[in-house]
Image (spheres, grey):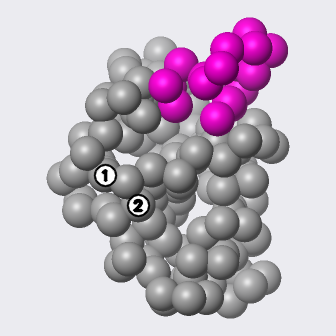
């Protein structure tokens, strides 16, 4: 397991994926990429910068190298699928719900779309 992709949003819940990546890094020394994808209509990069900074702090405290990436798109799930395939990730780790968890869907809409269309193995964290 060489490359792990962790798509996150601005929710605290999405950071639960880090714990699993941490464990896998200890075993496989995997390259970890934390990805924040936002809708193009959002103005500014401040939230992406903030969430990626928190990710960087988490992994730095554990002395785990991490790649931070921010993207803007009209379809968040499609961008995650595109990046996972194009960049050859071996595993995606993402949480079951993100910012819109209040809707109480079984899976968040982004996670749901990724789960049903991804070719890469995926670990969904509740």
Above or below residue 90? Residue 14 is above
* Start-end of magenta stretch: 96-112
**Residue 101 in sight in this render:** yes
Residue situated in front as seen by the camera: 126 or 110: 126
**Residue 53 in sight in this render:** no
- Indicate the position of residue 102 as horizontal and vertical percent values: 80, 15
**Residue located farthest toward the left when viewing the structure as drawn:** 86
Q: Which mark is residue 43?
A: none
Residue situated in front as seen by the camera: 111 or 76: 111
- Indicate the position of residue 124 as horizontal and vertical percent values: 58, 45
x 68%, y 89%: residue: 63
Label 2, residues with CA under 10 Å away: few <14, some 14-19, many ≥20: many
Residue 123 forms part of the magenta stretch: no
Q: According to the image, label 2 marks what residue?
A: 91
Q: Quadrant of residue 26?
A: bottom right
**Residue located farthest toward the top when viewing the structure as drawn:** 103
Q: Distance between the Cα atoms at labels 2 and 1?
A: 6 Å
x 44%, y 66%: residue: 4
Q: Secondary structure at mark 2?
A: strand
């Amino acid at each position: 397991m060489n490359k792990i992709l962790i798509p996150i949003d601005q929710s605290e819940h999405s950071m639960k994926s880090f714990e699993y990546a941490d464990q896998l890094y200890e075993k496989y020394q995997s390259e970890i990429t934390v990805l924040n994808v936002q809708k193009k209509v959002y103005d500014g990069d401040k939230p992406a910068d903030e969430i990626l900074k928190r990710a960087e702090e988490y992994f730095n405290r554990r002395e785990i190298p991490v790649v931070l990436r921010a993207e803007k798109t009209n379809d968040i799930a499609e961008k995650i699928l595109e990046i996972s395939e194009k960049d050859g990730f071996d595993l995606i780790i993402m949480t079951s719900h993100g910012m819109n968890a209040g809707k109480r869907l079984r899976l968040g809409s982004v996670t749901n779309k990724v789960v049903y269309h991804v070719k890469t193995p995926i670990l969904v964290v509740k």
